[in-house]
Image: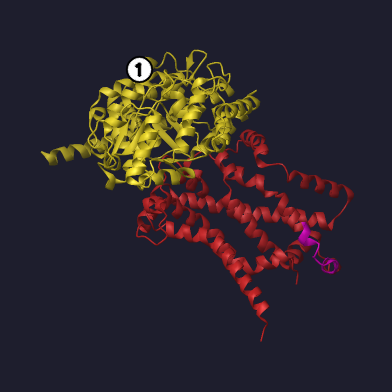
Chain colours: A yellow, B red
Amino acid sequence: MSSNTTRRGFKLAGALAGISMLSISVAAAQQITVWCWDPNFNGATMEEAFSRYQAQHPDATIDIQVFDKAAMEQKLQAQLASGSTDGLPDIVLVEDYRAQKYLLSFPGAFEPLTGKIDYSAFAPYKVEVSTVDGQTYSMPFDSGVTGLFYRSDALAEAGYSAADLENITWDQLIEIGKGVKEKTGKTLLPIDPNASDLFRIMMQSAGSWYFDASGNPTIADNPVFKSTLETYQRLLTADITKPVAGWTEYTGSFTSGDTLATPTGVWMTATIKANPDQSGMWAVAPIPRLGDIDASVNASNLGGSSWYVLSSAPEKETAIDFLASVWGQDVDFYQKILVNQGALGSLLAAREGEAYQASDEFFGGEPVWQNFSTWLAEIPPVNYGIFTEEADAAVVAQIPAITGGGNIDEIVAQIDAQVRQQTQ
Amino acid sequence: MSNPLALIGRGATYVALSLAAFVSVFPFFWMVIGSTNTNADLIRGKATPGDALWRNIEVFFTSADLPRVVFNSFFIAGVGTVLTLLVSSLAGYGFEVFRSRTRERVFAVMLLMLSVPFAALMIPLFILMANLKLMNSYQAIILPSVASIFIIFYFRQATKAFPHELRDAARIDGLKEWQIFLFVYMPVMRSTYAAATIIVFMTHWNNYLWPLIVLQTNDMKTLPLVVATLSQGYTPDFAVVMVGSIFATLPTLIIFFLLQRRFVEGMLGAVK
């Protein structure tokens, strides 16, 4: 039986090889070029998606080019600014925070996909970030749905169970942090004082951002923004955080057990699970909410990216067909990339699949993916606008003042002034 | 017997120099040690040799078409260095030896252009290359750097020490101007060339921004681009990055040690 199958396999392989030889000239004409920035994450998922497409369309080939993220953005921007479309890819990965900036700065450079993709099947907030004037441009990819990753073993030691972390406010988390410090002597959270991650998470949990839908700053007189800064101040002055500098030190801090928790995007799962010796010691709770803001929910977003098709793409039609037929509907594909790459896509129907239902021993046998996708659907949509980075910089510049116990109203006024000056 | 004050002074000098040596050698030490550890150990700050070197090398070698990438880097740096040295030294020699008021003005304008950052030239240069149909080619990277203002300036300064008598003697002997440059100037100035070789080779070898923009396919990538790709992504493996960095550092290091003595001479502007 098995030898029979093998022989048949050889014949099939031979036949396929023959076909691919014959189709080389055709294939060259149908090559889709993709730019992305992580060979193990978005590059690998793209490869998996394409192998599925290729099974139906043997003529098509793909060239996935992986760059360093900042470099890829620089390359894309330089080329779009020069107006020369020579050498641009067919499909490019864009971080959600930057999407509006590209779409508004380079009108006509990206292909609107409204009508070609059923956007009602995706998480609403992902669609919102790539919509300009009623046209949506992206194939939504990975979500940055947030959760509070924590060391369940250390917290249990301090007397806290999973129920104690379920749907809490940031102030409740501060109390937990103090309790943990008292009982175990360990610090709860690593905080990078040059990162704006926490501000973004807190703001979006209440459906608010630095700007409103028409791009006007919503910093002064915004109760959500004020509450965000106040919460951050309480968090940083409570002696439950440890300052870290840069990404490596940040991830190193909680993977080495030096700190016990971190509120971040689902994509951190891969980094945490890279230490198999910590299996069963981790858990994920819903992200805390802002206690004094009614609109704030226990769900938010950090990061995430989507695929865009360039209008100038030589293989535009093939690229769109590929995205729509695999990324747009293949539930099975989303199970595979969840298991292999830890990529949580934005296709809501994928939640019903097997992999999403499964529990994870690493996280104490909890169905973490199911939880993440439940939170995913609850993320309040916001429009990131085109000046998120400038606003981030203005906030980061005031972090020393915030942690130094400065007056929040004055700090808000300073941030507002800097953002207005930079964005007018 | 030397006096105790001088001894203390000397001790202080050694302490200061040792500190400076440590500060400059440590990154290199860290790179080598890091390449033998696993990523997790590296992040924890383990500063002793580990046993993951072969695994890291293996990952690095499978991460890109390395022979091709190394060839690209060597080809661009090699051809680029030879052309840059030829063109720029000829220009530097010319500016110093055949002076005129107009040439001084041209030279002054060139020096001013040193202050224009590359980022400002990038997009016009990109459009130029696109119109010349030179995108994704070795020429696109080599040509813009062949006339290096800094190297022209450097050769002009060095030429001031080139004895007039030699040139006059060569003329009397019947040599043409280009022969004087090739057979008298170049051999005499070999220390200057050696120093310039190191500088120019390093610039070409480490060039990152322009190749990034102008190279478009994986088979044209250079080493710095490959190393940069390794160091990003959501879960970078820093141990592999260290292996990549060693690879990218070695050629410059070898060239430096080969030309070290001449480099020092060249920097001092010695003509013997």
- Looking at the rendered image, the quarter that the N terminus of chain A falls into is top left
The picture quadrant where one finds residue B47 is bottom left
Local SS, label 1: helix
Q: Is residue A146 left or right of residue B90?
A: left
Work out whether B133 lies above or below A127: below
The picture quadrant where one finds residue B189 is bottom right
Q: Residue furthest right?
A: B101
Which amino acid is tagged 1?
Ala
- Residue B163 located within the stretch drawn in magenta: yes
Depth check: give the residue in front, B179 or B160: B160
Q: Is residue A132 left or right of residue B198?
A: left
The picture quadrant where one finds residue A394 is top right
Q: Residue at x 34, y 24 (%)?
A: A375
Is residue B116 visible to the viewer in this orientation of the structure? Answer: yes
Report the predominant secondary structure element of the magenta stretch: helix
Depth check: give the residue in front, B121 or B80: B121
Q: Residue at x 72, y 64 (%)?
A: B186
The stretch of residues the image draws in magenta is: B156-168
Work out whether B189 lies above or below A255: below
Q: Residue at x 64, y 59 (%)?
A: B197
Q: Is residue A355 left or right of residue A318?
A: left
- Residue B70 located within the stretch drawn in magenta: no
- Looking at the rendered image, the quarter that the C terminus of chain A falls into is top right
Which residue is identified by label 1? A121
The spot of residue A35 in percent (x, y) is 46, 34
Is residue A86 visible to the viewer in this orientation of the structure? Answer: no
The spot of residue A287 in percent (x, y) is 37, 29
Subunit ID for the residue under disc 1: A
